[in-house]
């Protein structure tokens, strides 16, 4: 019993620590990636995983990383969330789709689309920099996607450990 309580405390501490470190966007100049390279960054496969466990782990990961979940559709396995960075005058918009591959390995395919758009100032038609409010840019930095998938993998491992106890 003592061991299980310590795991719960560890999970809570991990969630608190993750919320202190939101996803970072590293500006990499002249980074030109092909559509295939971007899709590779966005897509991951996980085996031995049910669709419902993947969906729950995704929700937990977004919340642990400081995202606000704005839309969910369990039937479509779709999650939309955003994270505001006032210091950088931008918002990260994340859309995650989860697809069951229906093979004997219980493979789940996740596709995470990350983009940024400037904060809206409230004045009609402009943001804080005077740009149009919804001029979004796809995030093209591998480390940003890797941060999410590292946290997602850790959440999955915690879920499996809790189920096996």
Image (cartoon, rainbow, N blue to C red):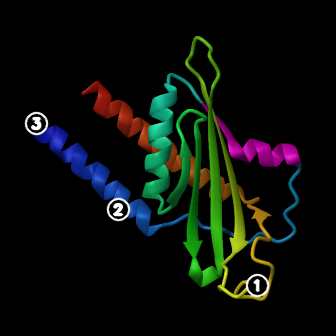
Of tags 2 and 1, the one toward the viewer is 1
Q: What is the spatial separation of the Cα atoms under label 2 and label 3, in whole angstroms?
A: 23 Å
SS assignment at label 2: helix
- Does the segment drawn in magenta span residue 62? no
Q: CA distance from mark 1 to mark 3?
A: 56 Å
Q: Is residue 19 above or below residue 14?
A: below
Q: Pick whichever of labels 2 and 3 is earlier in the sequence.
A: 3
- Dot 3 falls on a residue whose secondary structure is loop
Q: Residue at x 51, y 61 (%)?
A: 67
Query: Which residue is label 3 attached to?
Result: 1
Q: Which residues are magenta?
A: 35-45
Q: Within 10 angstroms of label 3, few (less than 14), some, or many (20 or more) residues?
A: few
Reading the image, the residue beneath label 2 is 16
Q: Horizontal placement of 144 versus 68: left or right?
A: right
Q: Which residue is mark 1?
A: 126
Kindly check if marks 2 and 3 are in contact, taking CB atoms under 8 A apart as contact: no
């Amino acid at each position: 019993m003592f061991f299980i309580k310590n795991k719960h405390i560890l999970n809570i501490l991990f969630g608190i620590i993750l919320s202190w470190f939101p996803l970072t966007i590293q500006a990499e100049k002249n980074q030109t990636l092909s559509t295939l390279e971007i899709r590779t960054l966005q897509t991951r496969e996980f085996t031995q995983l049910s669709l419902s466990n993947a969906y729950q782990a995704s929700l937990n990961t977004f919340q642990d990383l400081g995202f606000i979940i704005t839309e969910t559709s369990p039937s479509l396995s779709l999650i939309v969330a955003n994270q505001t960075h006032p210091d950088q005058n931008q918002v990260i918009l994340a859309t995650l789709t989860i697809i069951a591959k229906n093979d004997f390995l219980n493979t789940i395919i996740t596709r995470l689309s990350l983009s940024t758009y400037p904060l809206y100032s409230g004045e009609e038609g402009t943001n804080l920099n005077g740009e149009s409010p919804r001029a979004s840019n796809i995030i093209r930095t591998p480390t940003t996607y890797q941060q999410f998938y590292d946290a997602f993998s850790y959440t999955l491992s915690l879920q499996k450990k809790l189920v096996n106890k």
